[in-house]
Image (cartoon, grey):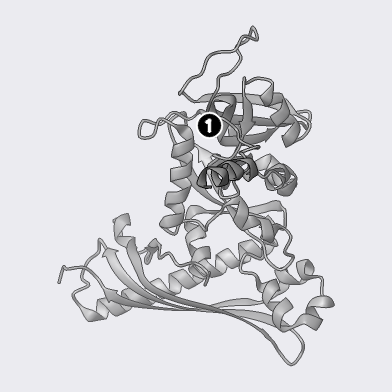
Amino acid sequence: MKAIQAVLMLILLAGCWDQRLVKDINLIYSQALDQTHDGKIETTIVTIGAGTQNQSGATVGTSTMPAIISAVGTTPRDSRIQLNRKVSGDLFASKNRVTLLSRGLAEQNIYSMLDVHYRSPVSTTNARISIVNGPAKDALHVKTAETPLISNYLGDLLYGLENTGNIPTTSLEDILSLLFDKGTDFVLPLLHVMDHHNIELHGVALFNQNKMSGELSADQTLRLLLLDQKQDKEPRLNIKVSNDNAIKANNYATVDIEDRKSNMKLTKNSAGQFQVGFDVKLTLNVIEYPKDSLYIQENVDDLNNRITAQLTKECEEVIQIIQAANCDYYGIGKHMRAFYYRDWQNTDWKELYPQIPISVNLDTEILYHGIVN
């Protein structure tokens, strides 16, 4: 009886009809998209797989070493088709860690470059996405001593910057809903290829819906995230607190944020005008202050006041920049849609947003200042 049951189970159970053997495919580990001079799309990939074709058309056997391959097409999908003609196995992006776009493409329509990734069931939407100043493919040709595989280097770089609070989380999945949300915009890391051995974070690219419309430096990005109540990472800040000291280092203080409470409020006054206020309270630990003398409470209070004033000024400058770029990073439009829906329906948000008064009320408290007393 058991034998009959076993035979029936073998007949009824379905097999793996859609299996793809590793020996038959090439896995994409990172990719970069650029625009050619005639408006076509060049896709450059880093792959390890079943081998590639040399210039004579012969297939080079399976290798565990990464290969960097480029192809040009009329669309990202077409360029992928052209890439498939250069490798011996089908290309799959299920292991892709990083997607890079050139600044030129980002300033046009970012979604048109990403549509292929959202439609394909084998693409990983957890891949990080970033903008590159200059040709994006240059980043894939960087040779690093610490991490020989460029895909791992780029992935670890972006993950590390997220974990230390230098940039927000920027995966393909995270930005998909924001691309179609008229009440919220997003930012993406802006990378700069220094030379053949280094890539650095230049800051973030600001987006007005699906187009890059401005940028912030790396330090300004920290101020942007300081006001963001969604952020749960506490960054380290270097702050200029004086102009009076001949020794330049004595004009700065470096602090760790031990605790942060941020709140944004959208209000409407009696005249029907909207305004936004940020209330932020920071608890700080001074980890570097070359001028010293923090064993005197009066000096601690003075430094605290200087930090408050400077950070408030810098945060207000960042708000002016993102408003000028029409980048509603904080989702103020979403708040208006939720709490003032009639106004939202009768308002062209992209015309109103740059004109809304936005204020910052920042309060800091130095709780720790090292073991030097």
Residue lying farthest to the bottom in this orientation: 270
- From the top left corner, tell me how far across and down residue 5 is, in percent: 56, 47
Residue at the location (83% across, 76% down)?
345
**Quarter where residue 11 is shown:** top right
Q: What is the x, y in percent for residue 176?
A: 67, 56
**Percent position of residue 254, x then y:** 33, 62
Q: Residue at x 69, y 43 (%)?
A: 120
* Residue at 61% across, 35% down: 19
Front in this rendered view, residue 72 or 281: 72
Q: Is residue 261 left or right of residue 341?
A: left
In screen coordinates, is 73 left or right of 121? right
Relative to 290, residue 72 above or below: above
State which quadrant residue 106 falls in.
top right
Residue placed most toward the observer, 190 or 174: 174
Comparing 189 with 241, the one in front is: 189
Q: Which residue is mark 1?
A: 140
